[in-house]
Image (cartoon, rainbow, N blue to C red):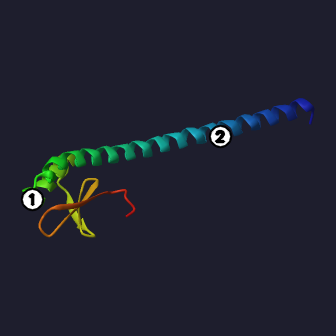
Amino acid sequence: MNKSRVAILVLALALIGSNAWWAYRAVDAGVTAGYHEASFREHHQALAQAIAILPVAANPDATPAQVLEAAKQAARTSNTFEEDGFVWVGQLGLKFSGAGRLLEVKPSWSPF
């Protein structure tokens, strides 16, 4: 093989390798952007819910049903479920005392 064919082969392999690397980086950036957007939406919904339940929960006469309704409206969902003593609505878990007072609020991404 002469030198020009070797040079062409090396350059072609370098071009293919660099294009593969750029393609990988583009796909990785797209996936990362998708995860960031999903995380932003979750945090945005949790903040909207927290702001919506604050005035309701601050009222000493508020019932758990009123607090849950405010959280449902902010989350734009009617789905709730109970797990580990929390009532989960949207992105927030709400824990109530036996007397019906809001004791604790936990975001869905919290490890605790």
Q: What residue sits 75% from the left and 36% below the top?
A: 14
Amino acid type, callout 2 = Trp
Tag count: 2
Between marks 2 and 1, how big is the CA–CA gap?
A: 57 Å
1 versus 106 height, above or below: above
Which quadrant is the C terminus positioned in? bottom left
| Callout 2: SS | helix
Q: Relative to the observer, which residue lies in front, 52 or 76?
A: 52
Provide the residue designation for mark 2. 21
Question: Residue drawn 19% across and 46% down?
Answer: 52
Q: Residues within 10 Å of mark 1 (few under 14, many from 20)?
A: some
Quadrant holding the N terminus: top right
Residue drawn at the location 37% of the way across and 56% of the way down: 109
The answer to whether residue 66 is above or below residue 26 is: below
View extreme (top): residue: 4
* Percent x, y of residue 70: 15, 50
Q: Are marks 2 and 1 in contact (CB under 8 Å)?
A: no
Tell me the amino acid under the disc marked 1: Thr
The mark nearer the N terminus, 2 or 1, is 2
The spot of residue 67 in percent (x, y) is: 14, 54
Left or right of 90, for residue 9:
right
Residue lying furthest left? 61
User: Where on the picture, by quarter, is residue 26?
Assistant: top right
- The residue beneath circle 1 is 63
Residue 17, given in percent of the width and then of the height, sits at 70, 40
Q: Residue at x 34, y 46 (%)?
A: 43
Q: Secondary structure at mark 1?
A: loop
